[in-house]
Image (tube, grey):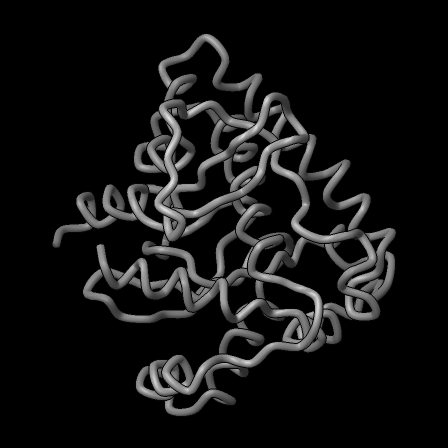
C-alpha cells in the first residue's frame, strides 16, 4: 500500500472519531468499534471522558482542568474559525490531515491540537491497567520486550526538544514504530516526518505537566504509565490491523 492510500485508510478506521451532541461541550466520543456513524463531519468539542481529578496523583486536577477547558477548547475554537468558509469546513479532521500542507498554519496547528488531545484523553484512564498477553507479545515482537518498548517510548517523550508529542503508531506495512513530532503535528499529517496510525500518545507541552512537575518532564513521563488505558490502545491496534 502506498503512503497516500495508507493515510487515506487511516482516516477511515478506528481513529475516525464520531462526535454526537447538540452543541460544543456535549459531544460524546465514540470510535468505529461501536459501528456508529453520523452523516456529518461537523467538528464538535467532546466531553472529557473522566473527572478532572480522576488521574490523581499522577496528573493533578487543576492541570487537567486548565489543559482541557482552556488549552484544548482554544484549539477547538481556533480550528473551527480557521476552516470556516473554506473547502475544509465540511471535511473530517483526518481528511484535512491528508493534505494539511495545502492549508494554513492555523489549520495545521489548531487542527492538530484539537485532534491530538482527543487521542490523549482517551488513551488515559483512572486506575492502573496492563496490556493483555497478546498485546505484550506484539510489543515484544517489535521492540524485544515490553520494558524496552516503554523505555523507547519514554525516551522519545523525554528527548522531544521543546513542545510536542511522542507516539506509538502503526507505520505502513503494519509495522509498529515509535517517534515524536513537534508542536501539534501528528502521524496522520502529510507533512509529518513519521507517518502512520496513532495508537498511543503523550503530550509533552509544558502546560501538560508544569503545575505539578515544573521542569521535571522525565518524572511526568515515567508517571504516565500509571494511567495508560491499554484497552483503548489495543482497540486502536486491532482496528489499524484491519485496514
Q: Name the foreground residue: 230 vs 190.
A: 230
Does 138 appear above or below 74? Answer: below
> In the figure, is residue 166 to the left or right of 194?
right
Q: Which residue appears at 36% of the width and 87% of the height? A: 137
Seen in the image, is 17 located left or right of residue 60?
left
Q: How many marks?
A: 0
Give the quarter of the figure containing the N terminus.
Answer: bottom left
- Where does the C terminus fall, quadrant-wise? bottom left
- State the image coordinates of residue 133 (x, y, percent, origin top left): 42, 87
Residue 31 % position (x, y): 43, 47
Give the x, y percent position of residue 203: 62, 56
Residue extending farthest left = 1
Pinpoint residue 204: horizontal percent, then vertical percent: 65, 58
Residue 14 versus residue 220 in the image, above or below: above
Q: Is residue 181 above or below residue 174?
A: above
Dividing the picture into quadrants, the one containing residue 175 is: bottom left
Task: Give the residue at x 67% y 77%.
Answer: 128
142 relative to 61 in the view: left or right: left
Q: Residue at x 24, y 41 (%)?
A: 8
Front position in the image: 164 or 136: 136
Please name whichever residue, 231 or 179, is drawn nearer the observer in this view of the structure.
231
Amino acid at each position: 500500500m502506498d503512503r497516500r492510500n495508507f493515510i487515506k485508510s487511516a482516516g477511515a478506521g478506528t481513529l475516525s472519531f464520531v462526535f454526537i451532541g447538540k452543541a460544543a461541550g456535549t459531544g460524546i466520543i465514540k470510535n468505529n468499534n461501536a459501528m456508529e456513524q453520523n452523516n456529518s463531519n461537523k467538528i464538535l468539542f467532546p466531553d472529557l471522558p473522566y473527572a478532572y481529578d480522576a488521574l490523581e496523583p499522577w496528573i493533578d486536577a487543576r492541570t487537567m482542568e486548565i489543559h482541557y477547558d482552556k488549552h484544548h477548547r482554544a484549539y477547538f475554537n481556533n480550528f473551527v474559525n480557521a476552516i470556516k468558509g473554506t473547502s475544509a469546513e465540511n471535511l473530517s479532521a483526518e481528511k484535512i490531515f491528508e493534505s494539511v500542507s495545502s492549508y494554513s498554519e492555523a489549520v495545521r496547528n489548531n487542527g492538530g491540537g484539537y485532534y491530538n488531545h482527543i487521542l490523549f484523553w482517551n488513551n488515559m484512564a483512572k486506575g492502573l491497567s496492563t496490556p493483555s498477553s497478546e498485546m505484550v507479545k506484539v510489543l515484544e515482537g517489535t521492540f524485544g520486550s515490553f520494558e524496552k518498548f516503554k523505555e523507547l517510548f519514554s525516551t522519545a517523550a523525554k528527548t522531544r526538544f521543546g513542545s510536542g508529542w511522542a507516539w506509538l503508531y502503526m507505520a505502513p506495512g503494519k509495522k509498529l514504530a515509535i517517534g515524536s513530532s513537534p508542536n501539534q503535528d501528528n502521524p496522520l499529517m502529510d507533512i509529518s516526518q513519521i507517518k502512520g496510525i496513532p495508537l498511543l500518545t503523550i503530550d509533552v507541552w509544558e502546560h501538560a505537566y508544569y503545575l505539578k512537575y515544573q521542569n521535571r518532564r522525565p518524572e511526568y513521563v515515567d508517571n504516565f504509565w500509571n494511567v495508560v488505558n491499554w484497552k483503548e490502545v489495543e482497540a486502536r491496534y486491532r482496528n489499524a490491523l484491519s485496514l
